[in-house]
Amino acid sequence: MNTITIEGQLRSEFGKKATRQIRSEEQVPCVIYGGAETVSFSAPAKAFKNLVYTAAFQIAEIKLGAKTYKAVLKDMQFDVVTDELAHIDFMELVEDKTVSVTLPIKLVGSSVGVKAGGKLVSKLKALKVKALPKDLVESIEVNIENLELNGNIRVEDVKVAGIEITNSPRIPIASVVMTRQLRQEESAAEKDAKKK
């Protein structure tokens, strides 16, 4: 599992003035929820670059003085004018507590439908899941080898040990559609068959 280390400082002052001061120093105010206590801290904006601007699922190891927290990104706000990172909420990973996260989907294998001339269409990039921290994975692999022409793989077809998928079960993840060229070839073959 990819882990990003963030070094920050605990916050002692709160309110708009203190928050503005933090942001003026190119720091981002943050909160860690879900553990024994709620922890408020700030860290340099550039420390979050590899955590925020990526589709990959990563764990944040947040070092605040002598303590280290393992957490996942829960929510973030951007400044409406400057588009700079304004605030981040983290969810602390607690061994025996399930956490809700979004994991990216990784399609694996070569679809029989694509081999037959179809086109693979990815319809869902990530899945919402609930799991214990020990069961979290970087991505959910979805095998598409048996995906046929005009076929779908839906959320309900994906099973991962220790992970509960919370998306609607009928949502398609990927499908193989017929290409225009294949349709033309099929209709030409049908016309030839009628002539005979």
Image (tube, helix red, strand yellow):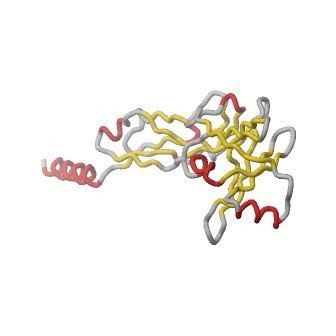
In this rendering, position of residue 179 left or right of residue 148: left
- Image point 70% across, 48% down: which residue? 74
Between residues 161 and 55, which one lies in front from this camera angle? 55
Question: In the orientation shown, which residue stands out farthest toward the bottom?
Answer: 81
145 up-or-down from 178: above or below: above
178 up-or-down from 110: above or below: below
Q: Report the number of numbered marks.
A: 0
Q: Is residue 98 visible?
A: no
Q: Is residue 190 visible?
A: yes
17 up-or-down from 179: above or below: below
How far across and down, in percent of the image, does residue 169 sit?
61, 43
How far across and down, in percent of the image, does residue 164 sit?
67, 36
- Image point 37% across, 49% down: which residue? 177
Between residues 135 and 121, which one lies in front from this camera angle? 135
Question: In the orientation shown, which residue stands out farthest toward the front?
Answer: 25
- Image point 43% across, 43% down: which residue? 151
How far across and down, in percent of the image, does residue 163 sit?
66, 33
In this rendering, position of residue 184 left or right of residue 69: left
How far across and down, in percent of the image, does residue 81 sit?
63, 72
